[in-house]
Image: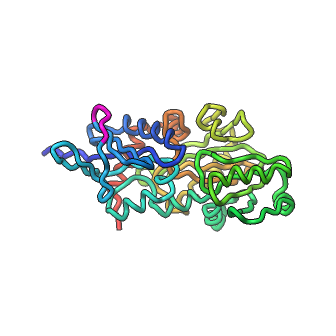
Amino acid sequence: MVMSKKSVAVVMGGYSDEYVVSMKSGQLIYDSLDRNLYDVYKVIILKDEWYFLGENDKKYAINKGDFSVKLENDEILKFDVCFNIIHGTPGENGILQAYWDAIGQTYTGCDFYQSALTFNKKDTLAVLSKYGIPSAKSVYLRQGEEINVDEIIENLGLPVFVKPNQSGSSLGISKVKEKSALIAATEIAFKEDNEILIESFLDGMEVSVGVIDYKGETIVLGITEIVPQNEFFDYEAKYEGASEEITPARIDDETRIRVEEISKRAYNSLGMSGFSRSEFILMDGIPYMLEMNTNPGFSPASILPQQAKIYGISITDLCGNEVEKALNKIRN
């Protein structure tokens, strides 16, 4: 008896500037999934159109009622699993997951709640502080609120980081060294989001930690040291090579164990599933959490695939594990 192959839609794109990276991540996953086990399809979700990309780059519209596709001869294509690799909105902030839950579509990665929560930096850090995970001192502001510069600087000191609360890819972040530059920096951040965070500067090594649940176990794939050529790990450093990434990070065993323990605790405390990458600053051996990404970059240049390679898990196995977990997940 021949088992029929499961159909997997690699869902990429998105509504933010990060869609460029998502398309590269999607391509790597599309290329890596085992064709002996799965029929693999490309699905692109953009603001103005959702479509399945067929042969000769022919576009077939997605029916949003049940996420199916009508092909030639009125044949209907349905997907056993959607492999979600959209960075930013709507695939990393819970919107897509909630929609898939509502129509009964199986998908990889974490559920909508974890996505929505972790996309909100302030709320993530507030929840994780209850589990003993430290973060920088910060001030949270909504657009339109009065900004008391003197009070903020007195509270946080200088320099500070000003960042949008809910934006990916380090867009809209500024490092402010002079009191006089604070207001301009908040305006830049408010262009990306109507809530912003102003954080005290942590002077230490930045590390990026890949955590996944693999074959039933939460594992740390790797700890990568980020050595930015710019002031900090910004968009250019992330995607245009203006930083050096060293895996494994140059830290002693005691610090490594502490980072691994805290990263796993953060992942498990939030009930995470799938790929994740958390950013920390190590100061005096203590990891301070900056944020957690639930759909981190997965292009060949991205940190997570590099960590998997060093850990010894092939991209094919890593992606296959995600699909199998999704297939075995009992949805409420």
Q: Is residue 314 above or below residue 127?
A: above
Task: Decide which of 78, 245 is in the foreground and name it.
Answer: 78
Residue drawn at 83 percent across, 47 percent down: 177
Q: Is residue 58 magenta?
A: yes
Q: Quadrant of the N terminus?
A: top left
Spot occupied by residue 219 in the image (x, y as percentages of width and height): 51, 49
Q: Magenta part of the protein: which range?
A: 55-59
Q: Is residue 113 above or below residue 90?
A: below
Spot occupied by residue 228 in the image (x, y as percentages of width and height): 70, 36
Spot occupied by residue 28 in the image (x, y as percentages of width and height): 42, 36
Residue drawn at 54 percent across, 44 percent down: 17
Residue drawn at 37 percent across, 54 percent down: 107
Residue drawn at 67 percent across, 41 percent down: 233
Chief SS of the magenta region: helix
Looking at the image, residue 233 sits to the left or right of residue 47; the answer is right
Task: Give the image's coloring scheme.
Answer: rainbow
Looking at the image, residue 178 sits to the left or right of residue 75; the answer is right
Looking at the image, residue 249 sits to the left or right of residue 116; the answer is right
Spot occupied by residue 302 in the image (x, y as percentages of width and height): 54, 37
Q: Quadrant of the C terminus?
A: bottom left
Task: Decide which of 126, 20 is in the foreground and name it.
Answer: 20
Q: Is residue 123 above or below residue 215?
A: below
How many numbered callouts? 0
